[in-house]
Amino acid sequence: MTGKSRAPNLMVFGVLLCLGLLFLVLPAYHAGNLARIMVLAVYAMGYNLLFGYTGLLSLGHAMFFAAGMYGLGLSMTGWGLSPVPAFAVGVGAATLASAIIGFLALRTRGVAFMIVTLMFAQAGYLVILYFGAYTRGDEGFVIQQADRMIAGIDLSGDAARYFTAFILFAVCFLGLAWLVRAPFGRTLIAIRENEERAQMLGYDTTMYKLRAMIVSGAISGAAGAGYALLFGYVGATFATVQYSIFPLLWVLLGGAGTLIGPLVGVFFMFYLIDISSAVTSAYMLIAGLALVLLTLFAPQGFAGELRKRVFAWLP
Amino acid sequence: MEFGPHLLLASLEGFVTAAILALTAMGLSIVFGVMRVVNVAHGEFYMLGAVIAWWVASLLGGHPAIGFVLALVVAPLVVGALAAVADRLILQRINYDPDRTIVATIGLLYIIQQTTLMTFGPEARPVEAPFNTRLALPWFEFGDKGLTMFWPWGLSTTSYKLFVIGAAVAILLGLWLFMRHSRFGLLMRATQQDRETALAFGIPVDRVYAWVFGLGAGLAAVGAVLVVPIQQAHYLMGQDPLLLSFIVVIIGGLGSLPGTIIAAVLIGMSDGIISVFFTPTLAKIIATLLVAMVLVFRPQGLLGRRAQ
Amino acid sequence: MSDIKSNKPLFTRRATLKGIGSGVGAVAATGVLPGSLGFAQAQSSEPISIGFQVHRTGIGAAYGRWYSRTTEAAVKRINDMGGINGRPVKLVAEDDGTDPKRGAEVVEKFATQYNCDVAFGTLFSHVVIGSAPRAGELKLPYFVVSEGHHVASGRLNRYTLQPGITDVKSQVKAMAPFVAENLGKKVTMIFPDFAFGHDHRDYFSAAIKAQGGEVLETIAVPPTETSFTRYFPKIPRDTEVLYHVMVGPSVLTFVKELGEFFGPSRPEIFGFIDSLEAVDIRSPGLEFLNGTYFWEGNPRHAQADQSPYDKNFRAAVGVDDRGASLSDSKDVSTYSHMFGCWETLNVIKKGMETAGYQGPADRAKLIEAVEAMTDMAHSDDHPQGAKWFDGKTHQVFGHQYISKVEDGNLVVVHTTSIEDGMYDDEVDYTTRPL
């Protein structure tokens, strides 16, 4: 028994240890990729809390990612904030956005929830264009290298960027590992499995779903802010529908409702595109075929299949 | 332009949008209603319809009407067959699992888009309308001399745009008759209401599903053939119709075909009319939020039933 | 008034640049000598590799295709003439999906995975702005062909340059005098609600005001719009000139619906050819364009006084006298933009030769060599026309063409001077560290 309950903890720390050590062995190009993957995995983890654990399919998370991104970007270029408080502004903006959208959208469920979140996110994208005087619309803006410093460390350096991404990932990863096994997380899973039963057991499920939405939005916003900070660019593309569909895809591929799934999904999609696009310009064809084959042969996503077949304890 | 003529023009444009939208969304609504799956590749079937229309028209030459009429027949058949094959090859094997269907149809979307890009190319290609006369429209106004008629600057439409509205209405009527009175329509409705019972009564549910998926894609293709003389065939043209169709289907109420049509008209018209009062992008924002709020306060859609 | 304003700093700028130029030249000369001895001894016959960031998929794919063809033709010509510094040029092309996120990843790939000497070729502004920070951080010279004002505005960095195509601010400014003098002074503008459209709005409004004209109304069309008629009633009745610029796959719908809206009573119409780039001007429904005017970056239809350079350029890229592909007359090129790839590659070649470029360690020298460039003569290297490069702002300035549509032909009626498109420097990149 004790061995079983220790296994998830071992896995969590094992993953972090591996990611930390990988920087030392990977060539520069792949280390850079991994930094991106970790930040995007944070986004996917935030999405996974809502979709994988709570069972709510949102198509509007790009709005929260973008809220974090623009919150950080605009407060740095507009108000001259330094990165740390600007990061807080970004996360704050995403939290606020997810609280408002959650409050409204949670009146609906199922496909209606999907569409309502999609439309709010679409409105959010158009708002970014509408205020082009401040946001530079679709073109976006650059956060200059000189401004992206924390305590004298240039975040655009290879090591600094990698480990900033790593810290962001580790904090979210550990936090979520704890959260999904805490009573709060258990309740979310209960809601996913059978909301009516959870209600009858006396849980205010709407309140729980709203909280899940806010935490999910805040984490997505942290990813957006982190991406802007580490890669120096803020743009409206990140607010488009595609960027709402991506986390869904990553999570489904990696394994919805698993802790490690989002990281696996992002990693897989990133390298699927990166490698196939070096070989052929028809990489979308390869990506499409891979997705179809995966649904046929690994329906639970990578981590989900692992849990089903090998490690039943996978959190 | 004066307010009245402006409103009329925007409404006319809204009607054209609504007509195409109703066709495309109807395809999605039928699939959604019967099979309960989210088909993310629906927009790509629409795009394929337009691309095939271009192939047919450019291969034939001669009077544009010949190519157009032929495309109206060929495109939905080809696209429908393709969709039915996809259903058999993929969706049936994953048992219409909701999550997996999303991933699989995203995959399908990539495949169709890339294949079109490699064969058809990245350009937007025009198809000539069978007829396209500019019709200036009159406007009536009470002035000092009583009711007078004048021709406002710019108030006009084209004969083809009017035809699109008429054609969409005719096709939807035909579809309604088909669903009401044909044997296939009966099978479909039976399957929609209760899959298990339908199976028990010996209805070949698998085949019905393939036909339904094909029919849905075919309707999208018809919408695209109608629209392609106004817009152009382009390999990325599927995204907007996909999103709009989704919205229409949900706003109309899941599985309610009349609801789908009402929602299509409502969304098409509001898009046109709101644009009269605000600057374009602001109008889009307001229209989007309005539609979202409709769902917030009526989560089951306009004509949907309460049950999930 | 504005001419005097922009001319005055120009002369001083030229003088100082000449100073810098000769200084760099002297430094370079000492470097060139061993260098040229170097390839005589075949020290390195490794190809120079140019990372080509190309829009193969996504919204920019139609442009990307022609950027590819032009780039391949230019590289072939350079290699036929003996390469750069005696070394052949190798193109490493990778798709960026017309997406800024992927764009940045591709630039990284060029720098750290493929070890490219330079990166080159991006068109869409958001991809440029998304990718440029990484190019700057990795100190990879990044030559864009985008016509955005992002480079000259000072928002990018020391390693990002645009030496092969003029920017939108300059293009728009050069148009205003012609519009005001020949077409009318009351202008209504229609443009996409993108930063690119806003640049048109802001710079043209200012420029037409300087000509004593005014902008009556600005209509910003939301992105991904596929029908436009409902926006046209916002055009005021007393509009003398309609100024339009549109991008994306729906441009033909836009122009067609414009014609259907106006019917027989249209105002003067002045458009940027972007609205019809890669579209045949004789497409059905465009007949009303006869008698309207277009800005062209490079005249799509071969003119009566065609230069031999333009003739050679068309032959090399495989484009006929109407700007369509030699193998398919329906495949119309992006003629007003793609010359930029050709000219940029020639600038890279010249820069590398001046700097005695040997390998990635000389990237900074390459930047300085290009910054020192000034006049570029109308030639086979620069078939679009003569240009003047501003080393401080990393932006080139050149001639613009205004064409009138006559019987479905684009006939050039006015060519602006380089000075018409000049404006005050907004940045001095040379003061930033390399």
Image (spheres, helix red, strand yellow):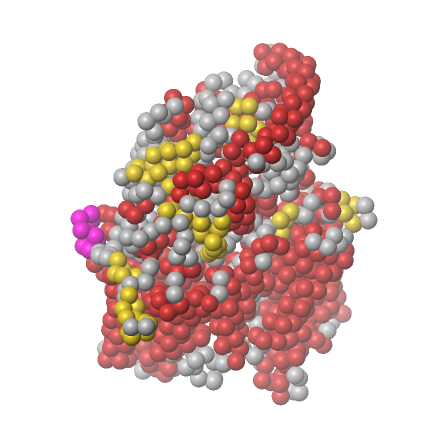
Question: Which residues fall within the magenta stretch?
Answer: B60-67
Evaluate whether residue B176 shows in this view.
yes
Lateral position of residue A258 relative to residue C327, left or right: right
Vertical position of residue A160 compared to residue C144: above or below: below
Q: Nearer the viewer, residue A179 or B56?
A: B56
Vertical position of residue B169 compared to residue B161: above or below: below
Where's residue A268, x and y in %?
57, 53
Look at the image and say whether residue B183 sits in the magenta stretch.
no
Where's residue C347, x and y in %?
54, 26
Look at the image and say whether residue B62 sits in the magenta stretch.
yes
Quadrant for residue B95, please give it. bottom left
Q: Nearer the viewer, residue C62 or B137?
A: B137
Where's residue C117, x and y in %?
60, 30
Evaluate whether residue A114 shows in this view.
no
Locate the C terminus of chain C by quadrant. top right
Lateral position of residue A176 relative to residue C152, left or right: right
Vertical position of residue C294 compared to residue B257: above or below: above
Locate the N terminus of chain C by quadrant. top right
Name the residue rendered at 32%, 27% in the picture. Answer: C304
Q: Main secondary structure of the magenta part?
A: helix
Lateral position of residue A192 relative to residue B61, left or right: right
Name the residue rendered at 64%, 27% in the picture. Answer: C13
Vertical position of residue C382 compared to residue B249: above or below: above
Name the residue rendered at 37%, 37% in the picture. Answer: C403
